[in-house]
Image: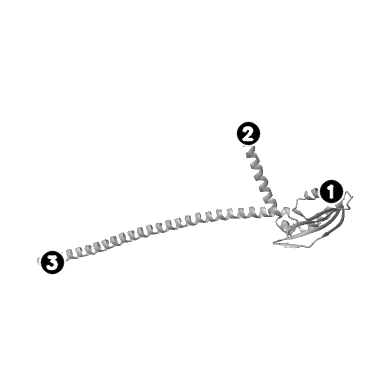
Amino acid sequence: MFGSNKNKSNSVQDETLKDHSKKIVIGVSVLIFSIILILALEVYTISLKGSQARQIRIGKSAEEKSKTIMTQMAKIGKETKDLEYKYIKSLQTIMSPMEFQSFKNSISGLASDNNVFITTINEGKTQKVRDYKMYSINLELLSGYTNYVNFKKDISKTPFRINFEKETIIRETPSSSKIKVNAIISAIIFEKKDKLFKDKKKFIEQMKRAEERKLAREKKLKEFKEQKNN
C-alpha cells in the first residue's frame, strides 16, 4: 500500500514537471517569435526610412532641377521678349503702306513751303526685299538750287528710312537760274506693320514702361555717383 502511494506521488510530480516544461517551451517560442518580429519590424522601419530618405533626396533633386529649368526658361523668356521688342522698335523707322501714302502726300506741302514746283509725282514699281517691299516715288521738279536743297533737308526729317536714288540735276535753260530735277525716293515698307503694332499694343506699352523705369533707375544711379564723387 505504501509502495502504491509512492508511485502515485511520483506520477503526479512527473506530470507537473511535464506541464511546466510545455509552458517553458511555449514561452521560449513566444519570446523567440517576439524577438524575430521586433527585428523584422526594425529592419522594415529602417528600410522604410531609407526608402523615404531616398524619395526625399530624389524629390529635392527634382525640385532643384525644376527650379533651374524654370530659371532658365524665365531667362530665355525675358531674352525673347527683349529681342521681340527690339525688332518692333526697329520697325518704327520702316513705313507701313498707309504711312507711305501719308509721306507721299506730304511731299507736295514740303515742296510748296520751299518754292519747289512739282511737275510730276507718281509711284514707281514695287520690289520685294526679303520680308519687306521697296516702294518708290518718281519725281520731276523745277526749282532754284538752294530751294531744292532745303526741300531735301525737310524730306530727310521724316522718322522713316528713305533714300534719294537716280538723282539728275540740269539747268532749265543754259541761262536760267532754275534747275530741273529727276529723282526717285525709295522706302522700305513692311506691309504687316499696322496689324503687328495693333496686336502687340499691350506688349509694346508694357515693354516701354519697363524701359522707362530702367532708364530712370540708371539716371538716378548716375546722379548718385556724380554726387558721391563731388
Q: Disc 1 marks which residue?
A: 145
Name the amino acid, label 3. Asn
Label drawn at residue 156? none
Label 1 neighbourhood size at 10 Å, few (<14), some (14-19), many (20+)? some
SS category of the residue bearing label 2 = helix
Between the C-alphas of marks 1 and 3, the distance is 156 Å
Q: Nearer the viewer, residue 144 or 113?
A: 144
Name the amino acid, label 2. Gln
Precedes in sequence: disc 2 or disc 3: 3
**Left or right, residue 1 beside residue 107:** left
Q: Disc 3 marks which residue?
A: 7
**Left or right, residue 112 beside residue 66:** right
Between the C-alphas of marks 1 and 2, the distance is 52 Å
SS category of the residue bearing label 3 = helix
What is the x, y in percent for residue 124? 80, 61
Residue occupying image coordinates x 63% and y 39%: 222
Precedes in sequence: disc 1 or disc 2: 1
Callout in the foreground (1, 2): 1
Label 3 neighbourhood size at 10 Å, few (<14), some (14-19), many (20+)? few
Quadrant assignment for the C terminus: top right
Q: Disc 2 marks which residue?
A: 227
SS category of the residue bearing label 1 = helix
Q: Are marks 2 and 3 in contact (CB under 8 Å)?
A: no
Q: Is residue 162 above or below residue 226?
A: below
Question: Where, by quadrant of the figure, is residue 168 drawn?
Answer: bottom right
Q: Nearer the viewer, residue 43 or 194?
A: 194
What is the x, y in percent for residue 48? 40, 59
**Left or right, residue 56 beside residue 18:** right
Quadrant assignment for the N terminus: bottom left
Name the amino acid, label 1. Tyr
What is the x, y in percent for residue 177? 88, 48
